[in-house]
Amino acid sequence: MDIQGIGMTSRRTRERLVTRLYEAGIKDPQVLEVIRQLPRHLFVDEALAHRAYEDTALPIGFNQTISQPYTVARMTEALLAAGPRKRVLEIGTGSGYQTAVLACLVAQTYSVERILPLQERARTRLQQLNLRNVHFKHADGGFGWAEKGPFDGIICAAAPEEIPEELLQQLAVGGRLIIPVGGASQELRQVDRIDEGQYRQQALEGARFVPLLSGSIR
């Protein structure tokens, strides 16, 4: 993979970010390489571009944030830990940064966003990066994208109080869901679909995400 368009920031800055992620426990070399090459500054407002390679969440408008690089890397690494994924559903396109990371690592990414202006900006950014294997839907993310399922991977970038049954049903047998769950106190969970109606859950670590809200916004 060789994504162009990073010129405004030095390779040294990006290398420092990758080093921090590695020291924080991210070990998957493919995930780290995507983080190294992907121009995160394109996914934030120009006024915040100088902070794009800090390991921190940043505002993107509409009371939403671009997740910190560690969170994106951790969720992606967990999703891929059991093997390659061909069809991945993302709940919450947001800035499109997590979408772009997935697009570099899986065959087809299906991304659902409830806030249309965010989705339109994300679509433009991915087109600029020539990432053509992403499909977008403007809808309530909690319902997933049933007509395109089942998926062998699902990543959710917002936290429901309980895991939506719709997402579990759209997970293929052998598939994996990575999702934050909770309210004031949240945890990142991994859910594997073992068989029809059978799931195995485990908590990965504490988390802090915006809540998964219903309804769509134009």
Image (cartoon, rainbow, N blue to C red):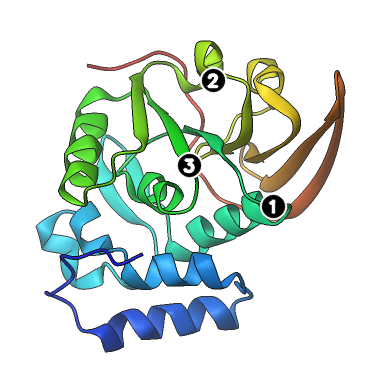
Q: CA distance from mark 2 to mark 3?
A: 23 Å
Residue under label 1: 83
Residue at 46 percent across and 16 percent down: it is 214
Q: Mark 2 belongs to which amino acid?
A: Gly
Structural crowding at the residue carrying mark 2, measured as other residues with C-alpha within 10 Å and reported as few (<14), some (14–19) or many (≥20): many
Q: Which secondary structure lies at badge 1?
A: loop
Q: Which one is nearer the viewer's eye here, 103 or 186? A: 103
Horizontal and vertical percent for residue 59?
28, 50
Give the residue type at disc 1: Gly
Give whichever of discs 2 and 1 has the lower sequence position: 1
On-image quarter of the N terminus: bottom left
Residue 104 point in image, percent of width and height: 41, 53
First in sequence: mark 1 vs mark 3: 1
Query: Do the CB atoms of the residues marked 1 and 3 lie less than 8 Å apart?
Result: no
Give residue 204's quadrant in the image: bottom right
Instruction: Point out the tag, 2 or 3, that comes first from the N-terminus.
Output: 3
Q: Is residue 172 above or below residue 104?
A: above
Residue 104 against residue 171 in the figure, above or below: below
Spatial CA span between label 1 and label 3: 13 Å
Q: Residue under label 2, please give it.
A: 142
Q: Measuring from the top left, give residue 165's x and y in whole percent.
A: 70, 17
Which label number is shown at residue 107?
3
How would you rate the neighbour count of disc 3 (Cα within 10 Å): few for under 14, some for 14-19, many for 20 or more?
some
Residue at 20% over, 84% down: 10
Q: Secondary structure at mark 2?
A: helix
